[in-house]
Image: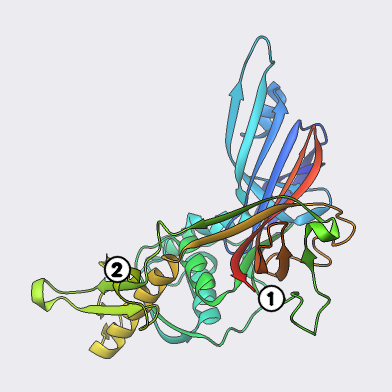
Amino acid sequence: MNLYIWKHVSEKKFQKIAVIDYAISVIWVRRFQDAGEFEVYLLASKALLELFTDGFLLITKEDDTENAMKPESIQLTTDSEEGNHLIVKGRSAECILSQRIIMPQMTFTSIRADEAVYYLVTYNAIAPDKGSETLREMRKIPELSIGSWLVEETKINIQYDGENLLEAVKNICTSVNMGFKVIFSSTGFAFWLYKGTDKTVNQTENTPVIFSPDFDNLGSTEYLYDMSTYYNLIQEGGEGEGSERKHVTVIESSEIKGLYLREKYVQAESISSNTEDGTLDSGTYNRILKQRAEENLRKAKETKEFSGEILNTDMYQFGVDYNLGDKVSIINEYGIQGTAVVSEITEVDDAEGYRLIPTFSDWKVN
């Protein structure tokens, strides 16, 4: 796997400064609703150590310069027998959002999910409009812009005050099944929202994508079902003390009871009825509190994950026949079958060769 090294040389300008075609191993992970990550293992040299500690750098693959990774840690190990090595790790360009927090307090009521995300990114990273002029200038990222616009009609009610921008974007996108990415070019980054395509056997609009040993395109697999973090009733506590504290309760289904009811209490200390625009009425405040409770209920689902090594990559080509966020059909040799979303793609290139390993989430058994 050939890698390009890019350096930020001036505002809105990145320059390719090196090519690495001698890595011992490369692990390259992209995700649908989160920042990806990477690891590059190299024989150490003084030149490489200086290269990876010299300013704001990005790494792209030779065959994909839009999806960049940002080095965040460089580990040097010396060994008289095994030799000296560098391990370079980091996250994908989406991690740029993690360099900002949401400030000041921002409250959204009955706003489309896409509008909320674009607003958060714009006014916390691209063109901050609050605080002193000096602070606003410092927080701007001139290299970041809004790319393709996606309309998501789902309305949300939510309040932020100091949360990490990346985490806020992830939470909103996960709640409405949107994906996000930060596309790199030599002049900067474009923030995109997007949705996957249904490519299961049950739909009629698109060519289906099926991963199964029967098609010789699914090798070793791993299926995980974990209920240890599962709850189906969330009580969210809001403002107030003692008997005056505001509460909302959300449940997965009114049919769940007895041994099957699993309760959890969460204190939403950051949600306040006092905002820059005045005091929220009780109805609006409760809607925001309920939205937070529903978000916590969504996170408290049982874990269902299925991953497998893709074989016969000529049959379905990643980036052409299917992509991150797409819904596909999967069948393994134990009869576990259903639909799942391609939530993560891991590419590995090492002494054993090149492998592409997808991770499937939102598993639904047929």
Quick one: label 1, few (<14), some, or many (20+) residues within 10 Å?
Answer: few
- Tell me where residue 32 sits by quadrant: bottom right
Q: Which of these two is toward me, 82 or 123?
A: 82
- Mark 2 falls on what kind of element? strand
Q: Residue 263 location, x and y as percent?
A: 29, 68
Q: Residue 143 location, x and y as percent?
A: 63, 60
Side of 240 relative to 318 (left or right): left
Residue at point 60%, 67% (across, down): 363
- Tell me where residue 293 sits by quadrant: bottom left
- Tell me where residue 273 sits by quadrant: bottom left
Residue at point 51%, 80% (across, down): 113
Q: Mark 1 points at which residue?
A: 148
Side of 166 relative to 271 (left or right): right
Q: Residue 53 location, x and y as percent?
A: 61, 34
Which part of the image, by quadrant, shows the N terminus?
top right
Report the disc number at residue 263: 2
